[in-house]
Amino acid sequence: MTPPRTGPTPAATAAPAFPADFLWGAATAAYQIEGAVDVDGRTPSIWDTFSRTPGRTAGGDTGDRATEHYHRYRQDVRLMSELGLGAYRFSVSWPRVQPTGRGPAVERGLDFYRRLVDELLEHGIEPAVTLYHWDLPQDLEDIGGWPNRNTAERFADYATLVAEALGDRVGIWTTLNEPWCSAFLGYGSGVHAPGRADWTAALRAAHHLNLGHGRAVEALRAALPRQARIAVSLNLHEVRPLTGSAADREAARRIDAVGNRVFTGPMLDGEYPADLLLDTARLVDWGELIHEGDLATIARPIDVLGVNYYNPTVASALPEGPAPGAATASDAGHGDGAQSPFAGCADVLFHRAPGPRTEMGWPIDPTGLTDLLLRLHREHPGLPLMVTENGAAFDDRVTPEGAVHDPQRIDYLRGHLDAVRGAIAAGVDVRGYFLWSLMDNFEWAYGYGKRFGLYYVDYDTQARTAKDSARWYAEVIRRNALPDPGA
Ligand code: IFM
């Protein structure tokens, strides 16, 4: 069930090692693994409501049971220990801690995370907490959700509660995970909870997520010891124009604005990019949305930028006539037929690069990760980076002998880790890598059909089985270097 440690260290590999203090981790998120959705005072989040709504998730799957991590966390920490993880990135469920999104904390909810953190520390694994991985308390959605400015204030209060409970033992804190998904898939295309399709609401949500991040940074700084490291994890789009034509480059620029710079602009540069404000002026009144002082709050310094990367995005302008092989923005890897998540870019086409894909249909191209890291280093020199998510879903099966052979995942990981190493060699300050994901789990609107884990989960018995990639990753961690292919 667990990956045995491999034998003695073979002769030094040709591949250069990662920096000596490089942090090797794996990541999960509360709603994707915990289950136990109605115990110890937890109330529904927007994902409970959404997934219980017919037609919203594949097969009607919900996170009700998930991988039962809430009750099996000790076993799961043992699996992490056998991998040799230096750190484990998990998220705290807001409705477990503060069911209505306001008021005092529910201690029974916090106790789960106290137990988890203690277990991690006992195994020598550094806990890395993400405060928000998409499970907004339904009560807050009922009064407007992220398009409502008040949600940012509520988020800061919640951040204080969690920091006061765990701050003495947790050194790495992330405010938001992938706010682009919360804003643009949750309120723009509607393929994520709460399932609203309204570009104005999506842009308002983006600003309030930015503000919530800034307010949470302030709250964390006030509550945490000085040495705590504070981050945000962004799923930045490595956007490439299909051709060098001015029209395609313009399409890529617009996607970059509403896919990336809508967050990096205010968070890292203290302002929204002028081109984004112009592009979206007909959708939202930015002057009304941004209050005095907001930009200074959003730009509170962070210690590390978390980068979540899976694949590059190829965009072009809508040509005259039909465009074979292309998909409109609504199909940009996030569900067919829905409104585009890229606000105001319905006329942009997305192209599926030839070559191998993952089970999600996402192209496999590690050069996108190197380019993204290089760009961030160029544009924000001095800001340490951490890959806080990277991984791939494949159609894993358990053999009659009880093994899970996943050579494609090993290839994917090798390529992307090599990309990280290449960026480090080029001078980029990358502090660590968190593989998505520790174990198979609830892949949001795709339900349980897409398996990203190092551990295969049998959802009937909840048995965890180490995939070959788990053994391979344990070896990477042990060597602090990539093993030779075939090793
Ligand atoms: O499963 C998700 C995760 O919750 C956020 N980032 C992308 C992963 C794979 O889709």
Image (spheres, helix red, strand yellow):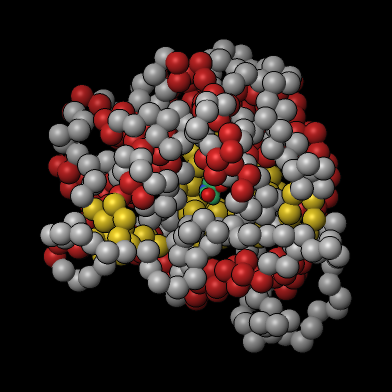
> What is the x, y in percent for residue 97?
64, 23
Compared to 311, does 135 lie above or below? above
Would residue 91 be visible to someone looking at this image? no
Quarter of the figure that contains the C terminus: bottom right
Compared to 487, does 262 lie above or below? above
Front residue of 54/137: it is 54
Circle count: 0
The residue that appears at 49% across and 53% down in the rendered structure is 308
Quadrant of the rendered structure where residue 378 is?
bottom left
> What is the x, y in percent for residue 345?
23, 46
Front residue of 52/220: it is 52
Compared to 107, does 369 lie above or below? below
> What is the x, y in percent for residue 364?
48, 67
Would residue 394 be visible to someone looking at this image? yes
Quadrant of the rendered structure where residue 189 is?
top left
Quadrant of the rendered structure where residue 210 is?
top left
The residue that appears at 72% across and 60% down in the rendered structure is 397
Describe residue 477's horizontal placement relative to residue 431 as left or right.
right
Front residue of 84/135: it is 135
The residue that appears at 20% across and 50% down in the rendered structure is 347
Quarter of the figure that contains the N terminus: bottom right
> What is the x, y in percent for residue 413?
60, 67
The residue that appears at 55% across and 30% down in the rendered structure is 51
Compared to 372, does 56 lie above or below? above
Describe residue 400's horizontal placement relative to residue 68 as left or right.
right
